Every structure is written in C-alpha cells, then in structure tokens.
C-alpha cells in the first residue's frame, strides 16, 4: 500500500451514542481484512490529559503502557484490536495548544506570526501522522469526541478538511448519528441526522459513510431519505442498532457489509476474512444463562453511570465470567452507607465475591474498610485494585495486627501507624502541587512469590502491570504483616515496592497495587480476574 489511509469518526445529534465502540469495531473489521490499523482518540477539552478529571464526571481514566492517562475509549481500542495504546493514540486541545505555544516560544515558526488557523489544525495533523508512523499503520482511525455541532470541535474538523484537501484519495469521514424514535410517534426520525450532516457539510466535509445508531435497525425508507440528503448510495448508510453486547457490534457491522464497503470506498482489496474470534464470542455469550453475583464496593456513583466510571473493571469481570460460561450480575454497593449503618454490610452476602476498585480521597474509605473486614471474616472472595489493596492492608492492620490507628497518610496524615504512605518521589510533587501526570504511571515489573495465589494465576514469577498511584505499602511494617498471616506475593525488584498482598487464612483475598483491568481482553481474560471468578464459583 503506497499511502496510509485516514478515517475520521465524528458524532452527530448527541454524544454517548457509541462512537468509541464504532471506532474500535471499524478497526477490528479492517484488521480482520488483513490491514495494520491504529486508533486515535481526539478529545476537545483543554486538559492536557484525563488524569485530573473526576471519573464520576468524565468516566474512567484509562492508563496506557507508557503511563498516558487517557479517555476510556482507548480501553475499547485495546480490547477490540489487541493494539497497545500510548500517548501517540491520544490528542487533546490542551496538548495541541501547549505544543504550538512551545514552538512559538522557541522560534520554531521562524519569526512568522502564529495563528489559530492553520497552525492549530497543522499540529493536529502532525500528531495524527506521527501516530501512523510509529505504529506503521496502513489505516488510522481517528475518533473526535463530542458532536459536529459543538464549537470546540471546529478546529479538529478543519484539520480533517485540510488533510483531505492535500490527500483527496486517502482521507475519509464516517459520521455516527442517532435516529430517535419518539415514544408517542413510534417511528424513527431522520431529521436530526440530516441536520448533523448539513452541519458537517458546512465545515467543508462530506461524509463517506453514515452509521445510524438507534434502538432498532434503520428502516429502508429512512436510509433512502438520508441517502438523498447526503448524496450517498444507500449501501453507505449502515444500521447500528442496540445489540446484546459491545462485542456484537463488529459482527453486526459485517452483516451490513461495512468492511467491504469501507475498503471499496478506500479503493483497497480484501486480503483475508478472519472475524471468527468475535463471531464465536458473540454467539457464546448470547446463550449463557447461568448467572453469578459479583459485588463492586465503590464511591463514584454520583453523576455518570457506574458503567462509565468502572468500565474496564466491568469488562474484566465479563471476560472472566464468559470463560466459565457464566453471566455476571454486577451489584453496586456505595461504601458510604456502611459508615452510617454497619448492619447494611449483610447485603454483601448476596454476592459470591466483592471487588474494591481504585479511587482517591477519604470519602467512602471507612465503609470500604468495613466491607473488607466483612469479606475477610465471612470468607467472601475479595479482590482489591490499587486503593482496594490499600484498604485491605489497612483493615488487616487494624483488626489483625491490632494497630487501631492504622491508616494511609493520604486519608489521615496524622496516623500513628502509616501502613500505607506516600512514595518518596511524590513528596516534593505534592508540596509543589504538581498533580498532572506526576503519579507512578504506566507499566512496571514485579516478581512473584512462587507459593502465592498470584503465581498460580500468572504461571510465571515475572509480570508487567500498569500503575496509577502516589501511595504505597510501608515496608517498615512488612514483617509484622507476614508474621500475622499476610503474604507479600509480589515485589517490584527495582524499588522493593510491595505490589501484591494475600491473606493466607482465606479462600481468596488478594490485593494489587496496580490495575490489572487495563490488560484484560475478551478472548484472553486477565489471570487474576480469571482466578477471582474461579474462587467465587467455589463459594
């Protein structure tokens, strides 16, 4: 292939209709046709990354192998295609302006005046091409956050238009637009989509393909109407209805011949047809009937749905349960209510196991500690992720080591027993209020104890997992914990940091300082989630 191809994915009508899953699905399909792909998410906010945004406000912060704190859509890109996302796969308005200003201050524009157009769009284009080169991608799929009608997306649309102007046969646009079905009318309406297409046209862009999102497939007369409005053949108007799971999406798209249509638009040939892995998965999960209750004790339940806040955790549970031909029923437990009424802890008996996921700040943590104690005493399988590992450590210190004041210095700076304490290299950063991208981020190695549950799960004593934290297990207390029945199961060999702890006198109680959920895949569940579900089945 002489020139790389670029596909821009833009939204119409409203956000949160599944552009990320659409972008991941298109990448998966093109990959199955024999092409090397790369995904990029472009977010419109002025934040440099997603790391300083509340997860309850924006959804999960996905951490790449190199430590980039990014939008949750990068998680779908990795889960669907197996690609490893880094900073090159993520662009924000803040990054773009920051780089343009840096270049201007360094005289890299050779004394020319620097303008919003074309310099901002040119920087966006430079980043897109940089991702293509580093990934050696034949096709790059770039998803724009938000919708075409939003002011902040204009410069990104201008970048797409400019790239198309210079490479007319290599740049294409897909719009994902919603087809509402008003309850009182009972029929699909295409006017919002027509308006979105007109808005896209006003930015100088003609869509090459339209994905019609809705509860049901787009009706033939709707396709015909949209075809007339946007001057495209009906074959390029693709239905994108609600399906059983996100992993059905590429399978459904293929039934609509999306892959074949896209390759024809790009003047490319099919090299192979190999979507069998997702087709088998899609069929398998539809027939699973037996359910299992998994509890998640968290605190980010206020604004957005739990599914956005903990999406990688949910998907990891799904992957591990499907492997065992089980359908997970995730039960959400707000930790704060246990602080007000301990009797409510009995609701945890409804579960076969509980997960305490990551998080920051003191709110809800005392309730999590109570939940960890309940799980330990009642032999309920427990899986602590990052903060969940620290919670498990604090609980064990208070109730087994009898250190009643034990705590984390994040939660109580005056604690007499800081069993969790700030990392040495983080102290100065906190004092200087250096919060952005300053945590221990990205992939770090750990060496496992060969007598541990963790070693049994991984089947190797050397692992590489992704991190996002400022606080760690305090090694001054290590001997006390081990003498009372807590196994130090994983250690970072470079800095002697505790990565995994396990309660020995328990069927399965394990906490990890890292985030295993970021590396689980639908066809390859993460080893620890796999073993956690196995322990839940035994219960």
Image: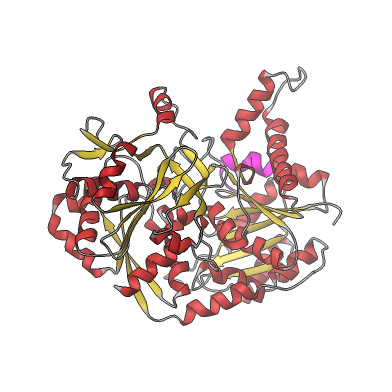
Q: Main secondary structure of the magenta part?
A: helix
In the rendered structure, the answer to whether residue 257 lies left or right of residue 446 reads right
Color theme of the render: secondary structure
Nearer the observer, 115 or 180: 115
Q: For the view shown, which residue lies furthest in the right direction?
A: 2
Snapshot quadrant of residue 345: bottom left
The percent position of residue 536, horizontal first and vertical second, equals: 33, 70
Q: Residue at x 24, y 69 (%)?
A: 350
Snapshot quadrant of residue 255: bottom right
Nearer the observer, 193 or 86: 86
Nearer the observer, 477 or 366: 477
Q: Residue at x 58, y 60 (%)?
A: 177
Q: Residue at x 75, y 50 (%)?
A: 136
Q: State which region is magenta.
A: 149-158
The percent position of residue 190, horizontal first and vertical second, equals: 58, 65
**Is 438 contained in the magenta span?**
no
Q: Is residue 273 above or below residue 35?
A: below
Q: Residue at x 37, y 56 (%)?
A: 306
The percent position of residue 518, horizontal first and vertical second, equals: 50, 54
Q: Is residue 202 above or below residue 104?
A: below
Q: Is residue 383 visible?
A: no
Q: Is residue 78 above or below residue 54?
A: below
Q: Is residue 55 visible?
A: yes
The percent position of residue 137, horizontal first and vertical second, equals: 74, 53
Snapshot quadrant of residue 269: bottom right
Position of the C terminus, as image quadrant, is bottom left
Position of the N terminus, as image quadrant, is bottom right
Q: Is residue 388 above or below residue 44?
A: below
In the rendered structure, the answer to whether residue 333 lies left or right of residue 499 reads left
């Amino acid at each position: 292939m002489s020139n790389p191809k670029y596909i821009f994915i833009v939204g119409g009508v409203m956000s949160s209709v599944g552009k990320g899953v659409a972008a991941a699905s298109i990448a998966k399909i093109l990959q199955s046709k024999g092409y090397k792909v790369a995904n990029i998410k472009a977010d419109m906010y002025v934040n440099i990354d997603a790391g300083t945004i509340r997860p309850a406000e924006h959804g999960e912060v996905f951490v790449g192998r190199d430590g980039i704190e990014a939008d949750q859509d990068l998680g779908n890109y990795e889960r669907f295609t197996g690609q490893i996302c880094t900073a090159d796969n993520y662009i924000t308005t803040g990054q773009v302006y920051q780089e343009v200003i840096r270049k201007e201050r360094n005289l890299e524009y050779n004394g020319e005046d620097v303008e919003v157009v074309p310099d901002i769009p040119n920087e966006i284009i430079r980043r897109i091409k940089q991702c293509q080169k580093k990934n050696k991608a034949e096709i790059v799929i770039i998803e724009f956050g938000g919708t075409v009608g939003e002011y902040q997306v204009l410069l990104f649309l201008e970048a797409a238009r400019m790239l198309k102007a210079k490479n007319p046969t290599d740049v294409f646009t897909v719009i994902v637009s919603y087809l509402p079905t008003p309850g009182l009318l009972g029929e699909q309406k295409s006017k919002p989509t027509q308006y979105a297409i007109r808005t896209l046209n006003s930015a100088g862009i003609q869509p090459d393909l339209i994905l019609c999102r809705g509860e049901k497939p787009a009706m033939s007369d709707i396709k015909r109407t949209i075809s007339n409005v946007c001057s495209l053949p009906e074959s390029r108007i693709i239905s994108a209805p609600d399906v059983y799971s996100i992993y059905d999406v590429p399978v459904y798209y293929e039934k609509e011949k999306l892959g074949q249509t896209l390759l024809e638009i790009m003047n490319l040939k099919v090299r192979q047809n190999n979507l069998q892995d997702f087709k088998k998965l899609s069929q398998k999960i539809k027939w699973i009937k037996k359910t299992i209750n998994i509890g998640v004790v968290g605190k980010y339940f206020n604004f957005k749905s739990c599914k956005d806040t903990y999406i990688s955790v949910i998907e990891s549970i799904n992957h591990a349960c499907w492997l065992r031909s089980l359908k997970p029923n995730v039960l959400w437990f707000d930790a704060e209510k246990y602080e007000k009424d301990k009797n409510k802890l009995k609701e945890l008996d409804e579960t076969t196991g509980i997960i305490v996921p990551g998080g920051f700040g003191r709110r809800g943590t005392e309730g999590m500690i109570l939940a960890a104690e309940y799980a330990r005493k009642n032999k309920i399988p427990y899986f602590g992720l990052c903060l969940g590992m620290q919670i498990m450590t604090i609980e064990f210190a208070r109730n087994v080591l009898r250190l009643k004041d034990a705590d984390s210095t994040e939660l109580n700076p005056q604690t007499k027993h800081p069993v969790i304490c700030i990392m040495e290299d983080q102290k100065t950063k906190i004092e200087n209020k250096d919060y952005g991208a300053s945590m221990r981020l990205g992939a770090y190695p750990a060496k496992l104890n060969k007598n541990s549950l963790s070693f049994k799960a991984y089947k190797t004593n050397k692992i590489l997992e992704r991190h996002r934290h400022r606080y760690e297990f305090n090694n001054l207390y290590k001997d006390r914990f081990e003498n009372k029945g807590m196994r130090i199961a994983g250690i970072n060999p470079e800095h002697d940091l505790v990565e995994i702890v396990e309660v020995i006198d328990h069927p399965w109680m394990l906490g990890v300082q890292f985030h295993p959920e970021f590396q689980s895949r639908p066809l390859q569940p993460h080893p620890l989630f796999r073993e956690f579900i196995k322990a839940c089945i035994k219960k």
